[in-house]
């Protein structure tokens, strides 16, 4: 059980999983960072991203990777619209109001998907789905490697966007201090809409990538939603770079937990980590709220 | 709103209760009506119970399926060991209440939205744990219970009785010093603490009371359904039903959960045959519309239509709207 080969193979799996986890959580982190809104509809957009990729695949035989990229502009617009039409109107109210509204949106997305595609498991099989590569003694599924590579590329692009463009700098300034950003002449309202668009685009993109690894149903977003939230809490909520760290922690914890417990209990690891992280690090959580006032 | 709404409502409730109690006498064989009544009352009771923590104290929990499921399994397991099912209801409640302490003591320290997220984690973790405890719960193949049970009329009245108990509890909590303490901590936790409200204790007591009631409902459900499955009684859908019932009816009010449950099951009953999943869609849309235009839910809308409050609609979206979802945005007050 604890052979060196086993441990190395678990580490490789964890790193590959962490890449996917990071991509799927960036959206949540950006939206939370800019407007302190917990985007529960992220799960819905993740699911919708997977189904849209299925639609492209069925209609035009489009590869899921291309489908995931095609999702980005569409979901960006959808996210922008959600912000302008819904979220903006309750932002002045309490944090819980926006959480509940986005929860309502999640329900709507989920049940629309249910009525369009039904509740059966769907999956996309590509030419490379069942292929594996061998490195020394380790066999790695091609899909996992592809997903990891694409995730790295997209995160690198995000990094460039955040650090080397005006929009990215304005966005990070708003995360750090919305009022100071406003004083410096940043249109924080526009940045918020933009952040919601980018966040939703990431959800659609991650949903598209996931079709390579998992089968999906309209209920498919929920466990990933909680995992994403665990990741951004572990990474320190405000800290966009922390997402990568949180994703790595969760991926490693899940993979190693399988050595000690039933595989069907794997999701409990994420939920337990979430509750523990929220409770043990209330300082992080409260300082966020303290700064807002 | 409180003073205006309370007095006719207080008189209407016993009258409504008595009228509803007569239904099984008038139509003892109308299974459709009795079933609809049973589920509506079961969820009226749970909505009212949820509202004690979610509405009065402003702590929105997405994890009440854990209490419902624990209550259901407590009754089921004791029943299989030869107990009379009705006698297990208090124990079902106690079991749920005990678990609510385990969950509540750490998580109720969190600020509103974080508490909500943590409860999703707790609820889902419970569902998966129960699925895997197959020696106790029957796991994924479920648990079959004895089939010798009372008539539908009996269940209808039992659910009505639990709903009545929940109603009386909610009215009592709201009018008591305890309820005032909850309202105070909902509005500003620090200020409440400064004035001597023991916020941690109050939140946990509210959580325990509501968990007890939901646990009893779970016990009655087990007796009615005679088959339990973790994915059924511990489901996320069960948890969110309570949130939706209270929010759409009117969070923090007494009549809100009652109205909400009635609408919930009317919509479900109407749509179930043709579009099984559509009632949640309708409810999602309702939730969004209500948060945009009338945060006090159907109860608030009814009050407005009745002309008791002449408030223009836009007030609903401003921060100053009274009786909204949770404490006012006095951010310093959180935790």
Image (cartoon, rainbow, N blue to C red):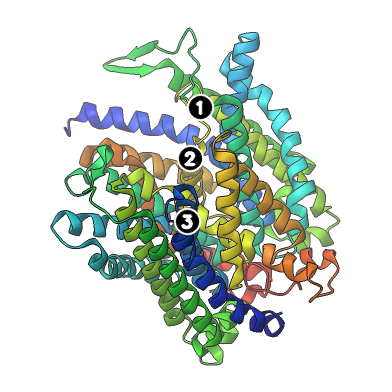
Pick the front one: A16 or A194: A194
Bin the neighbour count of mark 1 within 10 Å (Cα to Cα): few under 14, some 14-19, many 20 and up: many
Q: Are marks 2 and 1 in contact (CB under 8 Å)?
A: yes
Bin the neighbour count of mark 2 within 10 Å (Cα to Cα): few under 14, some 14-19, many 20 and up: some
* Residue B56 placement, left or right of A173: left
Q: Earlier in the sequence, mark 2 or mark 1?
A: 1
Q: At numbered mark 1, what does the secondary structure look like: helix, strand or loop?
A: helix
What residue does disc 1 label? A210
Q: CA distance from mark 3 to mark 2?
A: 48 Å
* Chain of the residue on which disc 3 is drawn: B
Label disc, if present, on residue A224 of the rendered structure = 2
Q: Position of residue A219 (x, y in %)?
A: 50, 36
Residue at image point 36% right, 42% down: A267
Q: At numbered mark 3, what does the secondary structure look like: helix, strand or loop?
A: loop
Decide: is B14 above or below B38: below
Say if residue B83 shows up in the picture: yes
Residue B57 appears in which quarter of the rendering?
A: bottom right
What residue does disc 3 label? B27
Decide: is B94 above or below A246: below
Bin the neighbour count of mark 3 within 10 Å (Cα to Cα): few under 14, some 14-19, many 20 and up: few
Residue at image point 74% right, 65% down: B301
Closer to the eye: label 3 or 2: 3
């Amino acid at each position: 059980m604890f052979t060196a080969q086993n441990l190395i193979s678990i580490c490789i799996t964890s790193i590959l999983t962490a890449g996917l986890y990071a991509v799927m959580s960036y959206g949540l982190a950006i939206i939370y960072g800019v407007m302190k809104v917990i985007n529960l509809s992220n799960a819905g957009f993740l699911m919708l991203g997977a189904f849209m990729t299925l639609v492209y695949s069925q209609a035009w035989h489009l590869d899921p990777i291309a489908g995931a990229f095609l999702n980005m502009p569409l979901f960006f617009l959808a996210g922008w619209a959600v912000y302008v039409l819904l979220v903006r109107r309750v932002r002045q109210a309490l944090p819980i109001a926006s959480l509940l509204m986005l929860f309502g949106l999640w329900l709507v997305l989920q049940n629309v998907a249910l009525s369009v595609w039904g509740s059966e498991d769907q999956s996309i099989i590509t030419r490379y789905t069942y292929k594996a590569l061998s490195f020394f003694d380790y066999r790695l599924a091609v899909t996992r490697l592809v997903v990891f590579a694409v995730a790295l590329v997209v995160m690198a692009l995000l990094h460039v966007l955040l650090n080397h463009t005006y929009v990215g700098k304005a966005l990070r300034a708003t995360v750090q201090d919305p009022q100071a950003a406003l004083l410096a002449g940043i249109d924080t309202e526009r940045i918020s809409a933009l952040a919601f668009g980018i966040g939703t685009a990431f959800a659609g993109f991650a949903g598209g990538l996931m079709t390579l690894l998992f089968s999906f149903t309209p209920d498919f977003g929920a466990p990933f939603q909680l995992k994403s939230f665990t990741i951004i809490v572990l990474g320190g909520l405000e800290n966009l770079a922390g997402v990568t760290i949180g994703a790595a922690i969760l991926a490693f914890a899940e993979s190693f937990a399988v050595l000690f417990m039933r595989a069907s209990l794997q999701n409990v690891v994420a939920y337990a980590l979430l509750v523990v992280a929220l409770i043990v690090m209330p300082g992080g959580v409260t300082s966020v709220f303290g700064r807002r006032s | 709103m409180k003073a205006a709404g309370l007095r006719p409502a207080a008189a209407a409730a016993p009258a409504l209760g008595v009228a509803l109690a007569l239904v099984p006498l008038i139509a003892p064989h109308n299974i459709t009506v009795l079933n609809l009544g049973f589920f509506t009352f079961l969820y009226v009771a749970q909505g009212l119970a949820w509202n004690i923590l979610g509405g009065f104290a402003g702590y929105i929990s997405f994890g009440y399926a854990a209490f419902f499921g624990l209550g259901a399994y407590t009754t089921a397991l004791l029943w299989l060991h030869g107990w009379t099912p009705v006698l297990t209801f208090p124990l079902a409640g106690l079991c749920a209440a005990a678990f609510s302490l385990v969950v509540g003591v750490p998580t109720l320290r969190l600020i509103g939205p974080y508490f909500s997220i943590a409860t999703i984690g707790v609820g889902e973790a419970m569902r998966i744990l129960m699925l895997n405890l197959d020696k106790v719960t029957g796991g994924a193949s479920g648990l079959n219970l004895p089939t010798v049970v009372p008539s539908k009329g009996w269940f209808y009245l039992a659910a009505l009785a639990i709903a009545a108990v929940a109603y009386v509890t909610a009215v009592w909590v709201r009018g008591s010093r305890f309820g005032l303490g909850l309202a105070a901590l909902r509005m500003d936790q620090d200020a409440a603490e400064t004035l001597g409200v023991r916020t941690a204790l109050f939140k946990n007591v509210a959580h325990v009371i509501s968990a007890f009631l939901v646990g009893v409902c779970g016990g009655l459900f087990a007796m009615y359904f005679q088959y339990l499955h973790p994915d059924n009684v511990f489901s996320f859908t069960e948890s969110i039903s309570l949130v939706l019932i209270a929010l759409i009816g009117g969070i923090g009010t007494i009549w809100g959960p009652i109205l909400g449950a009635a609408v919930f099951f009317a919509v479900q009953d109407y749509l179930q045959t043709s579009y099984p999943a559509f009632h949640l869609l309708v409810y999602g849309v309702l939730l969004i519309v209500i948060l945009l235009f009338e945060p006090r839910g159907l109860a608030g809308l009814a009050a407005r239509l009745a002309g008791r409050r002449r408030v223009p609609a836009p007030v609903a979206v401003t921060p100053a709207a009274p009786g909204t979802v949770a404490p006012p945005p006095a951010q310093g007050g959180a935790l």
